[in-house]
Amino acid sequence: MNTPHTLIAGDAWQWDADYGDYPRPTWVATAYFENASESFSVASTANGTAQRFAATAATTAALKAGQYYVQVRVTDGASPATVESGWCEVKADPASAVKIDHRSWARRTLDAVDTFLEGNATTAQQSMSIAGRSISRWSISELMQFRNELRGEVRAEEQGSAAGLGRDIKVRYGQP
């Protein structure tokens, strides 16, 4: 896909695409972005025979972060054609007053479990009943097991491509 896989709201966007059979200036391209809450388009201008897509920082600043389905259509005024489609992530404007929690689900959940265990380690009750109504919660041992699973998932996420590096693996060779 010629459209970038990641764009940042509040930044000026620019990318070029060459669609071979649909050269500029005969063909004009438009990239259409759409998700469940909004849609917008970015028109191209000529860059030789290529299409240059550009949007100003002022235009992108109001966009919501999220996954957008992108379709690029070209037209010569009479024959429109879709030349590419795929997904693009628009990330939040870092200068925006609206702050987003960038932690993964596993990291947020691990932090919540740790906070719960810290605050309720001595007073937590697995179940209780008052006036005929009852509530049951995870036991401390179940939470500890869940916490260990989350720790492994978070460790793998945070290490990314470096996962497994830095550990010594000892091997001994011998005759049978």
Image (spheres, grey):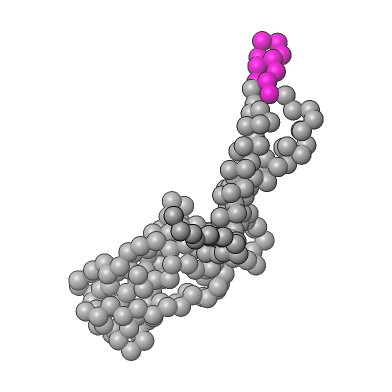
Q: Is residue 141 visible?
A: yes
Comparing 123 with 149, the one in front is 149
Give the prevailing secondary structure in the magenta stretch.
strand
Comparing 40 with 72, the one in front is 72
Q: Is residue 91 visible?
A: no
Q: Is 54 inside the magenta-drawn segment?
A: no
Residue farthest toward the bottom in the current orientation of the protein: 48
Q: Position of residue 175 (x, y in %)?
A: 46, 58
Q: Is 134 inside the magenta-drawn segment?
A: yes
| Residue at point 43%, 51% (across, down) | 36
Q: Is residue 128 above or below residue 6?
A: above
Comparing 107 with 149, the one in front is 149
**Relative to residue 5, is residue 77 drawn left or right?**
left
Q: Image quarter for residue 169? A: bottom right
The quadrant in which the N terminus is found is bottom left
Q: Position of residue 21 (x, y in %)?
A: 21, 79
The quadrant in which the C terminus is found is bottom left
Q: Image quarter for residue 142? A: top right
| Residue at point 64%, 45% (across, down) | 110
Q: Is residue 22 above or below residue 103?
A: below
**Relative to residue 78, is residue 167 drawn left or right?**
right
Image: magenta residue range? 126-135
| Residue at point 35%, 78% (across, down) | 17
Q: Position of residue 82 (x, y in %)?
A: 26, 67
Residue farthest toward the top in the current orientation of the protein: 132
